[in-house]
Image (cartoon, rainbow, N blue to C red):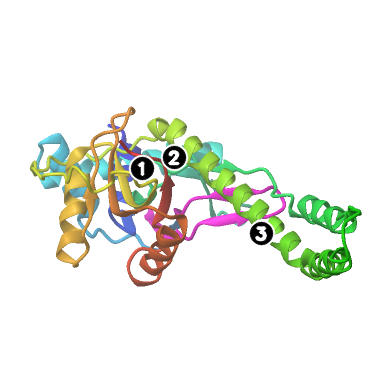
Amino acid sequence: MKMDQYISQLLYRYQCVTVPGFGAFLTEIQSAQLHESSHSFYPPKKLVSFNPYLKNNDGLLANHIAQSEKMSYEVAVSIIENQVATWKSKLNDFGAITIKNIGEISLNNERNFVFSPHDQVNYLTSSFGLTNYNSPAVKREVYKQEVEALEEKAPIVFTPEKRSSNNFMKYAAIFVLGAGLLTSGGFFGNEYYKNKIQQETLAVQTKVQKQVEQKIQEATFVIDIPLPNVTLSVGENATENKAYHVVAGVYQKEFYANKLFAELQNLGYKPIRLEPNKYGMFPVLYGSFSSYTDAYNAMMEIKKSHNPEAWMMIKEIK
């Protein structure tokens, strides 16, 4: 029997999974991380640790095994005891054991347990479908230099004309207009710089979204408990002609999308359920917006009041 498989299943749903007579695996949520030196983004995740002093049987693991294997609780307890005896024997003989998708436990010189977690599996269900991403640096300094160069080379051209006595007044008007251009050159340069930065930021966000869509089908998440089906209707015009969407979650199974949709409705939101994308995933939105500013403001408000892991999808949905 693969004990590691049952421990992994429980870590998705519980903060503490105790193996009677051996120790407890604990989880702690870590927020999304940004490493500025490498321009890398890391989604929120559950960090797994091990406490060898929590050994009492709380019944969670034994009951899960009994239900999954269709056996009695007492038999499940006996199986756990045999597995623990095997682990301890390997620790004494080889000094280390590996528990698949969880980590490695070894003994130090003082014969104390040392736990090294594996990071291939993210046990935080709200981060399902999210992977690490490396973004190119935004080179704002280059655009600043371009603006300064434009300001220095801004030409003022006078075109003389041989006309009647009104020519003097026309030349005076041209001179005043040129002086106005000189004083406002900084304003136009500043606007050019801001537009460049906004375009670069939007390009990076769009690239991030494409990377998420390409890699989201690689994520896996397995829970073996059967759940009932829910049928919901999806609004036809909720996202029409709108390219900015605040995402609550994207799920491989429609049931979880329906469940989140119902939860958001009960909280007073007006969520949107989209049809499955080309990878067969079911997105759930807080809402869709015509402008980037409206979507960003809504996303920041949702992060503060309800879901700090809400994110923006930039894509026109037809």
Please identify the residue farthest to the top as the structure is shown.
278
Closer-to-camera residue (76/300): 300
Q: Left or right? Give the position of 235 relative to 187.
A: left
How far is mark 3 from mark 2, CA to CA?
65 Å
Can residue 26 be found in the magenta stretch?
Answer: yes
How far is mark 1 from mark 3, CA to CA?
66 Å
Q: Which residue is mark 3?
A: 194
Q: Quadrant of residue 25?
A: bottom left
Can the viewer see residue 76? no
Q: Secondary structure at mark 3?
A: helix
Closer-to-camera residue (109/122): 122
At horizontal 8% and vertical 41% (from top left) the residue drawn is 229
- Residue 150, image x, y percentages: 83, 53
- Residue 129, image x, y percentages: 39, 41
Q: Earlier in the sequence, mark 1 or mark 3?
A: 1
Q: Left or right? Give the position of 13 relative to 37.
A: left
Q: Quadrant of the C terminus?
A: top left
Residue type marked 3: Lys
> 10 Å neighbourhood of mark 2: few (<14), some, or many (≥20)?
some
Q: Which residue is mark 2?
A: 89
Instruction: Give the magenta range.
Output: 20-48
Residue type marked 1: Ala
Closer-to-camera residue (294/160): 160
Q: Which residue is mark 1?
A: 85
Residue type marked 2: Ser
At horizontal 20% and vertical 56% (from top left) the residue drawn is 59
